[in-house]
Amino acid sequence: MIRCAAGGSKAALSCSRTDFGAHSSSWSLPLLLALVALVISLPGTACHQLRRDRLRLTIPRSHRVPLNISESEGVYKPGATGGPPGRTGGPQGRHVRSYNHLQGDIRRRKLFSFQKFFLRIDKNGRVNGTKSKDDPLSILEITSVDVGVVAIKGLNSNYYLAISRKGELYGAREFGIDCTLKERIEENGYNTYASAEWKNKKRQMFVGLNIHGRPVRGKRTRRKNTATHFLPIMA
């Protein structure tokens, strides 16, 4: 009869010589060697796995050296994407609208309204719309004065497009706070221009032309109102 005992990190095989001699004829040598190897290897394997588990619990995942292939599969490799996530060359998250075109040199444009009028500033400082695409008073210079804030000046009239505190649209001879306008691209591809300084009951006041080409009072304008929508066209 064979009696075997394994405990802790050590294994011992204890066999009775008397019983072994009596039954030696019934056991083959290869079977005995396999049994001995199995008994010795089991405790060592269990301890090795226990040490691995303890190592996982004590070392933070972000600083851990991968212990197997499955852990290393998710390791970030900068060379694979060309840069950290969210930057140039890396995977992008939510699309961010660019306003870089609002900064830089003076842009010479015509503002073509949704109502089919070209916005113009005449030599007396009056603001209205014209159907003529050749009207020299409709040529405007758009200059960035801050991020997303512009000044619009009539090239031939030398008047700035302005919105007063009361929401009146007019041409100003000198540049002032009435002449600062927030330029924004709307969902339909048109631009809106709102006073950067004045509001009416916390509502923005916009540059607008009605269906007759006359200026709309700022207090009556809204962002979604197509009377305030303009398409910049190269002049």
Image: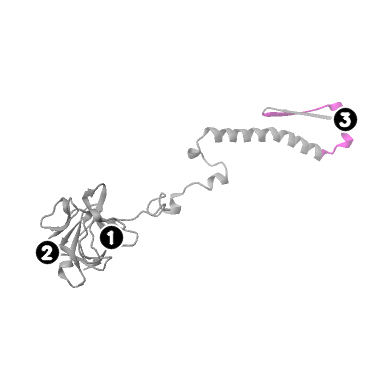
Q: Residue at x 46, y 49 (%)?
A: 77
Q: Residue at x 41, y 52 (%)?
A: 94
Q: Label 3 sits on what residue type? A: Gly
Indicate which disc, 3 or 2, sits on the residue closer to the N terminus: 3
Q: Label 2 sits on what residue type? A: Ser
Q: CA distance from mark 3 to mark 2?
A: 122 Å
Assign a secondary structure to mark 3. helix
Quarter the C terminus occupies: bottom left
What residue sits right under mark 2 in the picture? 157
Q: Residue at x 26, y 68 (%)?
A: 116
Q: How many marks?
A: 3
Indicate which disc, 1 or 2, sits on the residue closer to the N terminus: 2
Task: State the image coordinates of residue 4 (x, y, percent, origin top left).
Answer: 78, 29
Q: Which residues are magenta?
A: 9-29
As for residue 10 lying within the magenta part, the answer is yes
Vertical order, 176 against 113 (above or below): above
Assign a secondary structure to mark 1. strand
What residue sits right under mark 1 in the picture? 191
